[in-house]
Amino acid sequence: MTYTTLISTETLHQQLNNSNWIIVDCRFSLADTEAGAKAYRHGHIPNARYADLDKDLSSTITDFTGRHPLPNFALLAKKLGDWGISNTSQVVAYDDAGGAFAGRLWWLLRFMGHDKVAVLDGGIKQWQKQGLPITTTLPIVKPVIFRPYLDEAAWLSALQVQNGIAKKSICLIDARTPERYRGKQEPIDPVAGHIPYALNRAFQLNLDSNGLFLAPEQLRKQFKQLIGATEPQQVVHYCGSGVTACHNLLAMEHAGLSGSKLYAGSWSEWIRNKNRTFVKD
C-alpha cells in the first residue's frame, strides 16, 4: 500500500525494517535553528535521516526572497539520493510540531514528482506516547539515484499571485495565526498584515487536542465552509515563509480536496516589494 498524505505510528512501526521505507526527521525551531539537529542526535525514530529546514529544504535568502526560499532542486535531488531515497521509496517525514515542518518535505517531494510520501500523524510525540523505540544510532545509508520530475504548476510566484488577485481567479488562504493575519502582532517579519483578499485558517486548526490531524470528513467540511464554491485547484496557500502553508495543503489533500497550490515566497517575500499592497484589520 502507498501512503501519500498521513501515516499512523502503528503502521510505521510495522515497517521499520522495510528497506524501501525511508524515514526523515524534520524537527526544527525558528527560534533556535540548531535545536532540531540536536534533538535528532539525542534520540530519533530508528533508521531516520535528518533534514534541516534551512540547510537542506531551503536555499539562501536574497534581497528579493522570503525567509525560506525553495531549494535548488538539483542539489535537493542529490541529497535525497544520498539519504537513500529512490523514485520507488515510501518516504515518511516527521517532526515534533504537529507536522508544521515535516509538511515542507512532503510538499517538496510531491513537487519533485514523488507522491509516495506521508507525514507521521502526531510525529515523534505520538511515537513516544505509544512507547515505541527511540535510538541515538545513526542509520547506515546506501546512496541511490533520485530523479526529479518537477511540477511547475504546483506553486505560484508573487507576480502570479498578484495577477490571480486582479483576475479573481485564485482563493488565497493564510496559514498564520489570526493575530498575525490581522496585523495585531508580528514576531518575525518587519511588516504586519496580510495579502489583500486572503482568508485566514491557522494551520493549528487541522489538529485535535492530541496533536493528531482531524478526520478527513471534518477537514473537508471546514475547508468547504471556508472556500465555498471555489474549486480546490483555485486555492493558493501561504504563510510567513512558505513552510506551514504546506500543512493546510496537506490537510486539504487528506480531505480529498486535491490540487491546491503553494505561494512559496509567502508573506516574507510579499513585503520585500513596497509596490505590493497589504491589509491590516
Image (cartoon, rainbow, N blue to C red):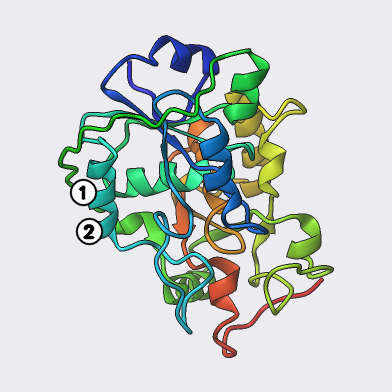
Name the amino acid, label 2.
Answer: Ala
Instruction: Give the x, y percent position of residue 277.
Output: 63, 82
> Which residue shows up at 30% across the image and 16% down it?
18
Q: Would residue 20 be seen by someone viewing this image from the given angle?
A: yes
Instruction: Give the x, y percent position of residue 171.
Output: 56, 58
Q: Is 147 on the left-hand or right-hand side of 106?
A: left
Tell me the quarter of the picture where residue 49 sits: top left
Instruction: Give the x, y percent position of residue 224.
Output: 62, 39
Name the amino acid, label 1.
Answer: Pro
Q: Which residue is mark 1?
A: 148
Q: Is 199 on the left-hand or right-hand side of 162?
A: right
> Which residue shows up at 20% across the image and 49% down it?
149
Q: Which one is in front, 212 or 43?
A: 43
Q: Which residue is mark 2?
A: 74
Vertical order, 275 against 149 (above or below): below
Q: Which one is in front, 254 or 123?
A: 123
Tell me the quarter of the picture where residue 140 sits: top left
> Which residue shows up at 75% across the image and 55% down it?
177
